[in-house]
Amino acid sequence: MKVPFLDLKRQYLAIRDEIDVAVAEVLDSGWFILGPKVAEFEQQFAQYLGVKHAIGVANGTEALQLALLAVGVKPDDEVILPANSYPSAFAIAATSAVPKLVDIDCKSFNIDPSLIEESISSKTKAVMPVHLYGQPSEMEQIVQIAKKHNLFVIEDCAQAHGAVYQGKRVGVFGDVGCFSFYPTKNLGAYGDGGMVVSNNDRLAEEIKQLRVYGEEKRYKSVVKGINSRLDELQAAILLVKLKYLDEWNQKRRKHAKRYLDLLSDVDLTLPKEVTGSSHVYHLFVVRTERRDELQRYLTKRGIGSAVHYPSPIHFQPSFKYLGYRQDDFSVSEKASQEILSLPMFPELSKEEITRVSETIHEFYE
Ligand SMILES: *Cc1c(COP(=O)(O)O)cnc(C)c1O
């Protein structure tokens, strides 16, 4: 039995009738960018999170970039983020601000709040916690530090649609929350898409302008914006899928529980849920010093796996200019050598999880 790391077709087949109707409706309407479907999806996504404003944009990276521009990040300002979240860094770099890396907590893989304060300087403008793998960051502490130092908080929720922290869904704890609808995410489009959410009227208005050339009205640009629009097809597809998000997240949690039970007696470090929050297992990430060996073993036996991410941001050649060195973020560096993402998606079967777990047992025997 082969087990894919991810199979998006299973989900499509399960909701095919609804999706096909929604797509045909958009094609018939002749309206393709920022139309009624986008408006409806924005409204429903805002309602789902319990937030005032939601603004559909082209992808998750630009959602973050727009949030940074809206809070007034300027070139050479510093923005704090965890050292292990590869995609997030590019949004900061796109604004010409400086990604200021902070090491992670070895258990949650999220930014270590106790290290934030020492990396704040007079140039720091914002903190960007990332709810990596679907697990909420420690927002209470992060927001407290940000308040004390007068910093904006921008949540990267690209892997955590529907994850709950202290009774509320992530995205509403900071000044702005940013989501990606890249096809593999917990709520995924059939193309690119993203969303910026906020309870702040001024920031929301700013982001609406910034996503269309900074226009106050058509062809009157009042601030330097970009072009980052959500399209009607993706919004129509996401409207169908949003109804299932909680059910799908429940399934991911159930699969995680099964993995945790079946793997409890092998020499692997398993994911741990931070108390008081609900992890939505965008990824199920285990940890072992024999990672490469284990991955080869699984691959040979037809079991998919992946590494998120194989190297921290400061090891990327394109971020060499930041001037960081080896050992600067030792927790992130060590994790990148040891983490392995196992198959995880809502449509995964019980038998497949058993098969993955048995194969891992065989490896250790
Ligand atoms: C996917 C992802 C992004 C970027 O989203 P895109 O839609 O691919 O641009 C940003 N941050 C994190 C943590 C992600 O997982």
Image (spheres, rainbow, N blue to C red):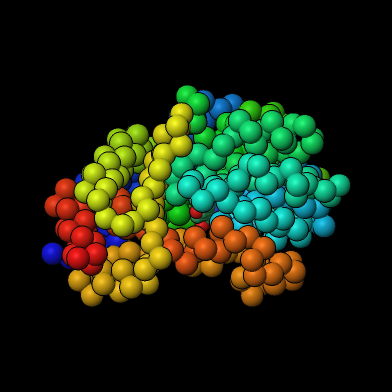
Classify residue 161 by image quadrant.
top left
- Residue name at image x 41 percent, y 34 percent: 278
Is residue 72 in view from this perspective?
yes
Residue 87: % across, % down: 56, 59
Q: How many marks?
A: 0
31 versus 358 height, above or below: above
Q: Report x, y in % for residue 129.
A: 61, 45
Left or right of residue 224, residue 56 in this image:
left
Horizontal side of 35 relative to 329 (left or right) equals left
- Which is nearer the eye, 337 or 266? 266
Q: Which residue lies at the image location 74% right of the left edge and 43% below the top edge? A: 117
Residue 283 image point, x, y percent: 39, 52
Locate the C terminus and report the quarter of the image it occupies: bottom left
Residue found 30% across the figure and 50% down from its top:
345
Residue ranking furthest to the right: 122
Q: Picture quarter containing residue 113?
A: top right
* Residue at x 75% of width, y 58% of height: 98
* 23 or 305, nearer to the observer: 305
Q: Nearer the viewer, residue 187 or 23?
A: 187
Q: Is residue 234 visible?
A: no
From this view, report whether residue 142 is shown above or below residue 363: above
Quarter assignment of residue 195: top right
**On screen, 206 above or below 284?**
above
Image quarter in which the N terminus is found = bottom left
Using the image, determine if residue 75 lies above or below residue 276: below
Residue 185 point in image, percent of width and height: 42, 50
